Image (tube, helix red, strand yellow):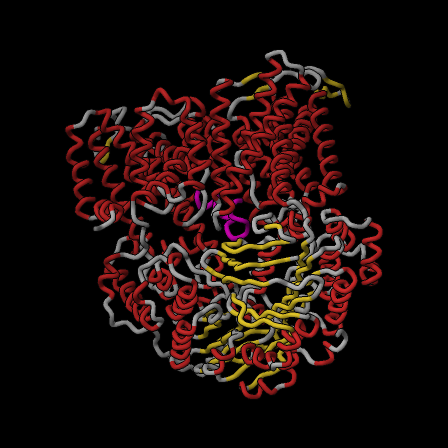
Amino acid sequence: MLEIKDLVVSYGAIEAVRGVTLTPAQGAITAIVGANGAGKSSLLRAISGLAPIRGGQILLDGKDITHVPASRRAELGLAHAMEGRRIFRQMTVEENLQLAWRFGRRRTTWGDALDRVFRTFPILNEKRATQAGLLSGGQQQMLIVSAATISNPSTLLLDEPSLGLAPIIVQEIYAFFTERCREDGTTVLLAEQMASLALKVSTHGYVLRQGRVVREGPSKELLETGLVAALSSAYL
Amino acid sequence: MIAPRTVLTRLLTHPAFILAAIAALFFGCSWLSGGTVQILTFLMLNILLAQSMNLLTGIAGQISLGHAGFYGMGAYASGILMKTAGLPFVVSIPLAAAIGALSGYLVSFPAGRVREFYLAMMTLAFGLIFREVVREWDGLTGGAVGLSNVPSTTLKNLSVFGVTLDAIDYFRIVVIVTAIVMWLVHNFIQSRHGRAFYAVHASEVAAGCLGIPRAGTKRQAYTIGAGMAGLAGGLYAHMIGYLGPESFDLARSIEVLVTTVVGGLGSMAGQILSAIVFTFLPEKLQVFAQYQFIVYGAILAFTLILLPRGLAGLLLLPPRFIKPASLRRAGTAGVAIRPVDSDRNAALVVEGVTMRFGGLTAVDDVSLELHPGRITALIGPNGSGKSTLVNVVSGIYQPTAGDIRFFGESIAGLPDHRIAGKGLLRTFQDPRLVPRFTVRENLLLGAHRRYRTSGLAAALSLPSAVREEAAFLASVDAVTRMAGIADVADRPLESLPYGYRRLVEVGRALLAEPRAALLDEPAAGLSEAEMALLARMIRAMKDAGLMVLLIEHHMDFVAELVDDVVVLDSGRIIYHGDIEGMRKSPAVIEAYLGTSETEGAHA
Amino acid sequence: MEDFLTLLLAGVSVGAVYGLIAIGLNLTFWTTRTMNFGQGSVMMLCAMLTANLIARGWMQGLAILAALAVIVVLMVFTEMYTVRPALKIEGSMGWAVSTLGVGIILQGCAALWFGSQAVAFPDVIFSAVDDVVIFGVHVSLQYIAVVVLALALVVVFELLVRGTVWGRAMRAVAMDQDFAAVIGIPVRAIVLGSYIASGLLAGISGILVAQIGGTVDPAFGFDLVIFGFVAAVLGGMGSTPGALAGGIVAGVLQQMVGGYISSAAQHGMAFALLILILVVRPQGLFGQREINKV
């Protein structure tokens, strides 16, 4: 179980996250929404160990991981699909997956892990020897979420997975992690700028603004109370 | 209760103190022994060397690991020219400086094409290779045996205009030369050139968008720094009378580097203190000579990590980059922004611009126009291509297709500093400012391209240069008042909260007297009060007749300011018109929120 | 003709070692975008320690291993205490100065312990006078051995980098440190490892050059690091075969110019070559043009 308490993240003088407390529901999808610059990415980066934490705590299954280096957090079951489609572009699809599997928790054999990926996304099988940098945006995102989940993480962080993707691909990606969540009981933390997308698949939602949580509640409620419309005036 | 640092700094930099010190040296030397006079001469040369490296490494941020090579170029040049070619002292010394400068230019030639540490390697290579070439080319330099019988005060055969100089005369000449050079360099550093050096050091991208040519500035720094070292070398040659390659080897380069690092990179006063320490200390500690290298190595290895600002950081106030004389003349009658003249051609026309990175199309056939006195908002979801478009227009990227015309002239593909030079300015999502500069110094950087007086005028502190800078400072003052930051104008930016950076960045753009301003999310992270100040500045731009493009997410902020809106999604324009229409446009709503089709698939 | 072939072989031989040095410099550049400016002293120290230990009666193989062990400790210290802290300071190139500082400390220590005179390097591989006759020309076995060894090391290195999981992990860290970290690759360990490997390559290079040159002195390494850098730049900083090719070109040119023109010209040539490449084709013969995205 992931718990975040009073987290403060700052890059030099810039305070990106100013005291955020949240506890994603285990085995369910939790949405983090907010405008650009609200602190969603910084929050996720702090959870996975990539951003400097100036205050507060992060607990994973009761253990304080606030100062544990990023590569060790993967071992503890944390996975992060970063924004900006970060992948090893000069390596092939298979090489990317192999590295993710080899340095992850390795709950399954390589063969089984690879099979599962290819069953879910047959196109990755076709492109297994292609350099990741040459794939289309959607295929890259498929690769990224596959790499993130290849080690059967207990907690999955997704940073704007829908960014720049065609709606039909977004559907596929969303279907993928929704199913994973259901099948494997993975806790998913989903950050999206497109609030309604995230709120429609999640059970609970947090709205961030300027580094703070300004609203939270069951996603259905957030959707129904016209929050989206209210948000849209913040966006639009 | 004034802090000791302030007292010490004011004392050391007070003109009366400096003149008294120079006078004491100049007149007092006749009472000193020959040995002492020679060490003091040596001290002056070390000060020159330390200042030359400070300019190059401390201010311009270019690491010089073979500085003794430049020193040696000057020394051998003057020595050979006087001894073999019979040139007079007053000709060979300036030539020594020129040859030093030329070698600095050569070393820095690849600047702008390669990463910075390549240049550092080049300086290391230059230093080592210089020594080897001197050793092998014995026909010219005397080789390993050295060049002896160089006309000098030691050999008592140095004469200028028929007068034979003794050690004391020479010392006086060196004192005067050192004082003059330092005065020139001090003026230079406190001029727009020094600020440009520092800007390129602190943020290359910011420098570019201000119209400061990065490669050229780096080369300038190497040329001037090496020239100063060459000058010191020439003076050295005629003090000592004998030149051997061991005097200009790696050990010497290390000594200069150590002196500069300990003095404090960026501080002229620190260099003087450090030069004093490192000239006299080795004398006193002869017995430790064998440990010298180890100590120097340790200093280099850890000082920048443990004590990055050296002695100057400990004892003195941080150096400032604006001439007090200019500040005094500035007055408060300045205007933050002047109305621009109308021009029939005034427009920024973006036509069919496409930007592709490999397989990814970030901007797809975008066309829009900006006109004077109008504010256009550019909005769109994350990843829609807004920043890329601004990067293309401002010259950071070259468009894959399409054209951009500014005042009728095609600017597509021009480098960023040239586009900035034409009056098209942009700000960045994450402000690119110089953290160690005060608010005032940062704002003044904006006026860089407007200066007309030359580097020489600045170095000589000519009245024309002072007047020009005072005029800009008056505008700076007006901008600080408009932005509501007048009370913190003299605080270093790094000590101020985030919101101030945004205001300073936009204010800096005003100082450049732009015809067009592209503002990339200026309101992000600002408080309500700060947003109001920002809005005021942007409205002033519009009233003055500028063309403004505003990328923003904060619709409340934008709604009151803009005349029209362009919405991008996945690199394409999906709406262009006024705000009301945008709120109702189905295409826009879908882009931001998605429709039922995209979400229906999963429960 | 005999001169030409001798010079050519000497050039290839010393050039192969330059290639090794270049690969060592590349390694840390890949993972951290830094380079050890004191690499020359690492080479020198390894060679001097080896010579010294052998002179004290140590078995040759053991002496070499001991020297390399010292190098490993040294590189760990350098990475942890002079590079990593310097990298944390935003934007500066302090790491160039601090690694140079460590190199200077080593040079000073070597002068203190071993004296500043040149020390003869014992014959570890064959003897200086062993030769073989090819096409009627006497060719030093030592030169041939050095070429073979250097090439073998390059091949082993490439195999390790391309063929093993840790090699791939290192390439991954070079491509994207953040992504590597989140998938569990121990980035800090790999960065440290790259410094250690770089030091080992430098140490071995030092021994090889000392073998062909015959002597070592405390100032021995800096020239080498410059030529190693020339090789790396010529070949392109990203490429191992490039580094080797660049090294051989630099080595051959150096020997030819030194033999047919003069020793002074030899050094001037290295510098001219560096400037030429950086101006005309900064990415080197085999490298990729770097695009800096804002």
- Quarter of the image where one finds residue B469: bottom left
Q: Is residue C4 above or below residue B427?
A: above
- Quarter of the image where one finds residue A172: bottom right
In x, y percent, where is residue B535?
42, 77
Extent of the magenta region? B104-118
Q: Nearer the viewer, residue B440 or B580?
A: B580
- In the rendered image, the quadrant that contains the C terminus of chain B is bottom right
| Residue C288 in view, yes or no | no
- Quarter of the image where one finds residue B175: top left
In x, y percent, where is residue A203?
68, 70
| Left or right, B169 with reference to B119 | left
Q: Nearer the viewer, residue A232 or A60?
A: A60
| Left or right, B379 with reference to B458 | right
In x, y percent, where is residue C135?
77, 23
Q: Is residue C6 magenta?
A: no
In x, y percent, where is residue C58?
64, 14
- Report the residue at 57% width, 51% height from top: A66
